[in-house]
């Protein structure tokens, strides 16, 4: 059986974390979960640790010293997974904006030949977003069009954060050269995988904005994405050297 790990970064997610972990860990498919916890002052880590007692072989936590950014949290999780025998590694939010049931659909895409499967809000030019104000929907939708125009990346939802990677993709990406930490991180990972020749596909999903907790989106994260795309346009993509990750 293929080993599957869902990486969930957290910062102040006490309202959501028990529910999302319980949902994923009681689903069919024997998914494992790694929570990368950035020293949340609201007690998120304590909730995770209490659940580890119930799921000791499938739920894990890595605690960091502070809020170090989404991109570094995922890379931390990727390295953790590569040091173990996981075949498929997922990115997923803690707040139910990504429907955990769609993990199976992303997995099916990779088992059917994709190297990277993206849970896409915009594939087919159909917007599948619930509970966002129209201004934010348009900003996100046209940001992805901007990314395609500047970089040539053939993906309609370049900032999507619901993803399944085959192990071989993460083994090939040179993490030391992934420089962005917010939405630009998501763009950089997709562009890197694509330029390295991996088969990147989009799977249509419905994205539902969080109903509890606080969004981590900031003007700085958005600015990084806009300006970072220009840098990515000229970035030289190289595979990881031997023993570098």
Image: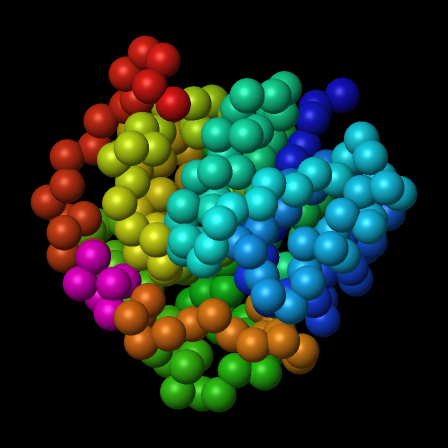
Q: Quadrant of residue 241?
A: top left
**Taking 107 as reference, is 66 left or right?**
left
Query: In this view, which residue lies farthest toward the left?
Result: 234
Residue at coordinates 41% horizontally, 53% vertically from top-left? 68
Residue at coordinates 59% horizontally, 66% vertically from top-left? 41
In reply to whether residue 30 is colored magenta, the answer given is: no
**Taking 183 as reference, is 41 left or right?**
right
Residue 231 in sight here: yes
Quadrant position of the N terminus in the picture: top right
Q: Position of residue 160 (x, y in %)?
A: 45, 58
Q: Is residue 157 above or below residue 152?
A: below
Task: Return the residue nearer the eye: 35 or 46.
Answer: 46
Q: Quadrant of residue 210?
A: bottom right
Task: Return the residue nearer the eye: 112 or 136.
Answer: 136
**Taking 186 as reference, is 74 left or right?**
right
Q: Position of residue 92 (x, y in %)?
A: 59, 52
Residue 154 in sight here: no
Residue at coordinates 15% horizontally, 41% vertically from top-left? 235
In reply to whether residue 227 is colored magenta, the answer given is: yes
Q: Main secondary structure of the magenta part?
A: helix
Quadrant position of the C terminus in the picture: top left
The magenta region covers: 223-228
Residue at coordinates 66% horizontally, 42% vertically from top-left? 61
Q: Position of residue 122 (x, y in %)?
A: 46, 65
**Taking 53 as reference, is 180 left or right?**
left
Q: Is residue 20 above or below residue 166?
A: below
Q: Position of residue 8 (x, y in %)?
A: 60, 50
């Amino acid at each position: 059986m293929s080993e599957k790990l869902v990486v969930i970064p957290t910062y102040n997610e006490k309202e959501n974390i028990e529910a999302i972990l319980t949902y994923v860990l009681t689903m069919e498919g024997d998914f494992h979960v790694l929570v990368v916890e950035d020293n949340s002052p609201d007690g998120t880590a304590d909730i995770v640790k209490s659940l580890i007692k119930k799921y000791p072989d499938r739920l894990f936590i890595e605690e960091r010293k502070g809020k170090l950014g989404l991109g570094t949290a995922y890379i931390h999780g990727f390295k953790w997974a590569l040091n173990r025998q996981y075949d498929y590694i997922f990115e997923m939010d803690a707040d139910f904006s990504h429907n955990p049931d769609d993990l199976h659909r992303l997995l099916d895409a990779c088992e059917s030949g994709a190297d990277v499967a993206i849970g896409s809000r915009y594939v087919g030019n159909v917007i599948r977003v619930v509970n966002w104000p129209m201004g934010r929907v348009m900003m996100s939708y046209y940001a992805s069009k901007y990314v395609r125009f500047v970089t040539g990346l053939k993906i309609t939802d370049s900032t999507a954060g619901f993803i399944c990677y085959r192990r071989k993709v993460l083994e090939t990406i040179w993490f030391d050269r992934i420089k962005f930490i917010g939405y630009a991180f998501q763009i950089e990972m997709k562009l890197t995988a694509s330029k390295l020749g991996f088969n990147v596909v989009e799977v249509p999903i419905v994205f539902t904005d969080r109903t509890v907790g606080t969004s981590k989106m900031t003007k700085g994260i958005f600015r990084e994405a806009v300006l970072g795309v220009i840098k990515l346009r000229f970035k030289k993509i190289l595979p990881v050297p031997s023993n570098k990750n």
